Image: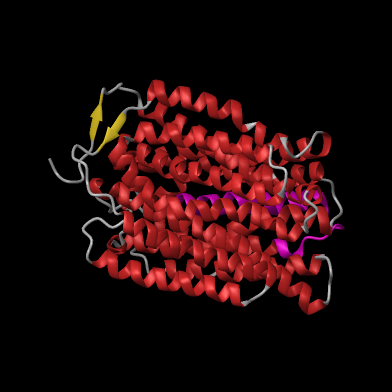
Amino acid sequence: MAAGAVKQAHPKQTKPRTVLLIVASAMFMEQLDGTVLATALPAMGRSFDADALHMSIALTSYLLTLAMFIPASGRIADRYGSRSVFRAAIALFTLGSVACALAPTLWALVLARMVQGAGGAMMSPVGRLVMLRVVSKAELVRSMAWLMIPATIGPIVGPPVGGFLVTYLSWHWIFYINVPIGILGVVLVTLFIDEMKEPERQKFDLLGLVLAGSALSCLMFGIEVASRAGVSAGVLTLVGAGLVSGVLYGLHARHTERPILDFRLLQVTTFRMSWMCGSLSRVAVGAMPFLLPMMFQIGFGLTAAQSGLITFVSSVGSLLMRTCAPWFLRRLGFRTVLTWVGLLATSILALSAAFRPWWPLWLIYFVLLANGFFQSLQFMAYNTIAYADVSREDMSAATSFYTTFQQMALTLGIAVSAAALAASMAATGHAEPRLADFSAAFLFVSAVSFLAPLLATRLDKQAGAELSGHGR
């Protein structure tokens, strides 16, 4: 049997759609947690006597842990079985949620978020790997749409639920709501997911994991600290250590048969283009859950509940898109969606910089709804075409690689937007962020995102036609 082949232990003959819904439910829990937390940051800052701007560490500590452990997810799933790893990941994420709710200090919360991140690092990529192994490439677009529907519901219900809990109960409850979902997920995975693993154990690249994890965490944590406290000797030390670790990892990976992050995957054109363009776009998308709730609560003077009843609209637009994404991709093709739809989505995102309290509420709703719709279509295209030309035996490596840099881009979006917000405050002499500062931050991350559709023009017109059905 080939080195990359996968065997199933005790096959359950479960329908692919059932597997997709179970995986999507785990993603629902993760997405719900992130959007609920973003709405609660100002209230949590008051509880921990911390500046609201500095509460970004509650988001980035989780994302940094993802960046450290996601590279190992595919290899661990191949070695110990995707069902066992997926189930353990859900359980660890749930336990981390309880620890977050019980955290007495900000740094205790950061440590608990890192436990959550260790679970999330295995949960999303291994869940996606399970999906990729049970569906054919011809069904990948439709399956990806199915997979993302429950995962999109999380961001829809997250802001209003988070706003309600923070306003009328306390922020601690935003973590407790993960407990019943996590328990149900463990039970469903046990009952319906097949155990899939490598027939022969491959040597685990432990040195690669240490070097890659050190590089990613030092670089991203350095950027995060710089965004809050400015450049210092500590920041330069972190970034320097990250760069050295990255160079050492590159030398190591060149002489390793199966490195933990396999950059040889970038030789696949569609995978490389999706990785490059998607990373640029995700910087802006990662900034949105951080900037929008603070803008509405600090800049507009709204309560957490009122803010949540506005920010969830983007996710409604995303959900609406899921029903028609296959039609768009079939009619337009991947290149057109990634260039023209990507350009439109980024333009609408930049319009968020103009939000002011005197705007009619329906107009803000319309902008956020359109933004969610077109951004979601863009990312559906990215997430699908990435695997168009990846072989089955390379799926686990590709999933780990892609998800690692996806999370890095989202982390970078929070750090960059926080830095842009702080820079605008310093330039204008504001002690607290004002609407003009939020506008500057939105425009900066939008400028980064505009590079993505420009690069996408280099994609072949027929790229991914087998998946989308474009031109048939």
Residue 269, percent from left and from top: 31, 63
State the image quarter where residue 386 is shown.
Answer: bottom left
Residue at point 30%, 21% (across, down): 12
Report the front residue among 334 and 407: 407
- Give me the residue at 43% from left, 50% from top: 70
Q: Position of residue 224 (x, y in %)?
A: 61, 64
The residue drawn where x is 41% and y is 38% is 127
Q: Is residue 460 magenta?
A: no
Q: Is residue 176 above or below residue 467?
A: above
**Residue extent of the magenta highlight:** 352-380
Q: Quadrant of the N terminus?
A: top left
Task: Please tell me in which quadrant of the rendered image residue 116 appears.
Answer: top right
Q: Position of residue 146 (x, y in %)?
A: 46, 36
Q: Residue at x 59, y 57 (%)?
A: 286
246 relative to 3 in the view: left or right: right
**In the rendered picture of this protein, how many numbered marks are placed on residues?**
0
Q: Residue 291 appears in which quarter of the rendering?
A: bottom right
**Between residues 1 and 179, which one lies in front from this camera angle?**
179
Q: Position of residue 434 (x, y in %)?
A: 82, 66
In the image, 91: left or right of 130? right
Regarding residue 323, the answer to whether it shows in the image is: no
